[in-house]
Image (cartoon, rainbow, N blue to C red):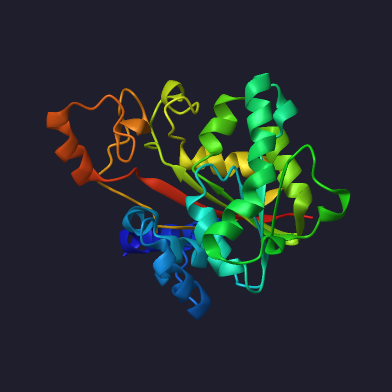
Amino acid sequence: MRRLILPTLALALAVPALVAQPAPAKTYARKINADLAAAVANPLRDKDRPRDQYRRPAETLTFFQVLPDMKVGEYAPGGEWYSRLLGLYLGPKGRLVGLYFDPTSGAFSETTQKGIREGAAKYPADIAGWSGIPAERFAAYPLDAVPEGEKGTFDRILIMRMMHNLMRWNIADREIKAMRDLLKPGGMIGIEQHRARPDAPYSYTDGSKGYLREKDVIAFMELNGFEFVGSSKANANPKDPANWPDGVWTLPPALRGAKDEDKPRLQAIGESDRMTLLFRKRP
């Protein structure tokens, strides 16, 4: 009898300690709203649509809780793939703002700085011309030239596959802090980022290969004034081993350095495995 009681007592004493442990981050799934579904299905996106299978825009924007009447910033719009969709989605009722690198951060040459400012200047016309929605519904500016009245007015900011560059260029702290200032109280940042394996060494996860460890991104954002809301599997790709010697660019769409005989295998893997994380601005 004594042998039976002691294990039971030990288990009972252990229960409070187990309960006290923090719960794992929640993974959310939400219903895609009609406005977003219509924007994703818009025939104007026919040339962009092939990448939907990898970027899962409807699921991603739903997880980021982006509603059609919100003010949303897209950071470093680049080729404007997401901007075109966001323009269709937000243009009628909300507002889309392109947020560009701070050219004065020290990470860019004079030529690149000029290109950043020119990109921001033409952004509203780019999205308007493509979507047919008036350019007045869109705006853009580099982070060193944000009008004072814009601070504290954004509902969401999206950072799509760009955190690795912020890390390797050593500008992540200042850029994230500048974006935090733009958010309303309780506003949120959504991050999609190439995901390294949890045990990947720092030499592979310093941004130079495109991959970051999920726990490092979460810790960084928490240190910079954000609460981790949760994660989504929308952009997960378990076929990506995330250990390419030349980094994420080995995979589609870049296929950088790939031999012709290797391209079918890489195409079958698809685009990278990606974390999809949501963070709320803390007071």
Q: Quadrant of residue 58?
A: bottom left
Q: How many marks?
A: 0
Q: Is residue 270 above or below residue 82?
A: above
**Residue 46 relative to residue 212: left or right:** left
Q: Position of residue 235 (x, y in %)?
A: 39, 54
Q: Is residue 124 visible in this depiction of the protein?
A: yes
Residue at the image position 46 percent from the left and 75 percent from the top: 38
Q: Residue at x 43, y 65 (%)?
A: 44
Quadrant location of the C terminus?
A: bottom right
168 lies left or right of 272 = right
Horizontal and vertical percent for residue 178? 75, 42
Along the line of sight, the residue nearer the viewer: 169 or 133: 133
Residue 221 placement (x, y as % from top left): 63, 43
Q: Is residue 65 visible?
A: no
Q: Residue furthest bottom?
A: 34
Give the camera-side residue of 248 and 7: 248
Is residue 243 shown left or right of residue 12?
A: left
> In terms of depth relative to the viewer, which is nearer, 109 or 133?
133
In the image, what residue occupies the spot 68% across and 50% down? 226
Q: Position of residue 277 (x, y in %)?
A: 52, 53
Q: Quadrant of the N terminus?
A: bottom left
- The residue drawn where x is 68% and y is 20% is 110
174 with respect to 58 (left or right):
right
For this orientation, the residue located farthest to the right is 148
